[in-house]
Image (tube, rainbow, N blue to C red):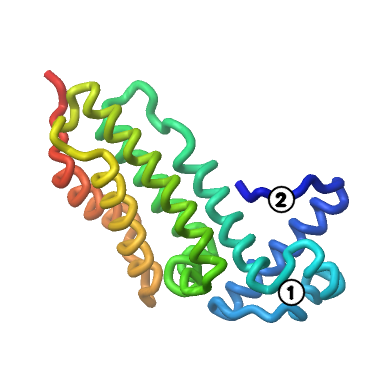
Amino acid sequence: MSDEPSLTRRGAATRERLLLAAEAELGAREGALEVAAVAARAEVSVGLLYRYFGSKAGLVAAVVDDFYDRLHAQVADFDPAPQADWAARERKRLELSVEFHYAEPLAGVILSRLFREPEVAAVEVRRMGRLVEDAARNVTAGQRRGELPADLDPRTVGALMIGSFRVAMGEALSRPRRPDAEVFVEQLWRFIVGGVRFTSPA
């Protein structure tokens, strides 16, 4: 979550309105953004926008941070199948992740265009690091239960899982016609489960 100073209820509502306006502009312009257009869409002054975000780059970085807040809340930060084995749990998490990215209007823009901006790159590095840590913990948990081989390095495997998903998802979202979600999940899952050499305990 972004490290923003505490705001009044009205201030928080204004900030949220600006974020939504920026998301709409980025989506409509395929990653381009004009501060004046965002302020007009949010029905506030340009000066107020700078007060909340400091700069155009700060606004774009906040939009990306907000995207990852939703990703963590809906996919990464909870156990989607508490009683299941590693494979069933992570397969469900993969399904949720694909569903999330397919439903998010800005997912394709964030994964294919905005990451080139320095301020956004800093957000991406921080967020990717957290996702890799989450994935590494999940791998370690699978090893402790005897479901994954002990010779796997959790952080390396976690980085491979997150990195390969990101590249594949970015490519899928850039196509004129997206792959069928179920087929896409199945292809990703075959790659993942083969790489970790999952073995269901007897």
Residue 184, quarter of picture: bottom left
- Which quadrant of the rendered structure holds the C terminus? top left
The mark closer to the camera, 2 or 1, is 2
> Residue visible at 71% across and 68% down?
21
Question: Reading the chain from its start, which is encountered first: label 2 or label 1?
Answer: 2
Disc 2 residue type (three-letter): Glu
> Residue visible at 35% across and 39% down?
92
> Residue visible at 28% across and 49% down?
161
SS state under label 1: helix
Check if mark 2's residue and mark 1's residue have beta carbons within 8 Å. no
Q: Is residue 104 above or below residue 24?
A: above
Task: Compare residues 122 and 183 and report the one nearer the observer.
Answer: 122
Q: Which residue is mark 1?
A: 38
Left or right of residue 83: residue 148 = left
Q: Which residue is mark 2?
A: 4
Left or right of residue 128: residue 196 = left
Left or right of residue 138: residue 190 = left
Residue 66, quarter of picture: bottom right
Q: Position of residue 19 (x, y in %)?
A: 70, 62
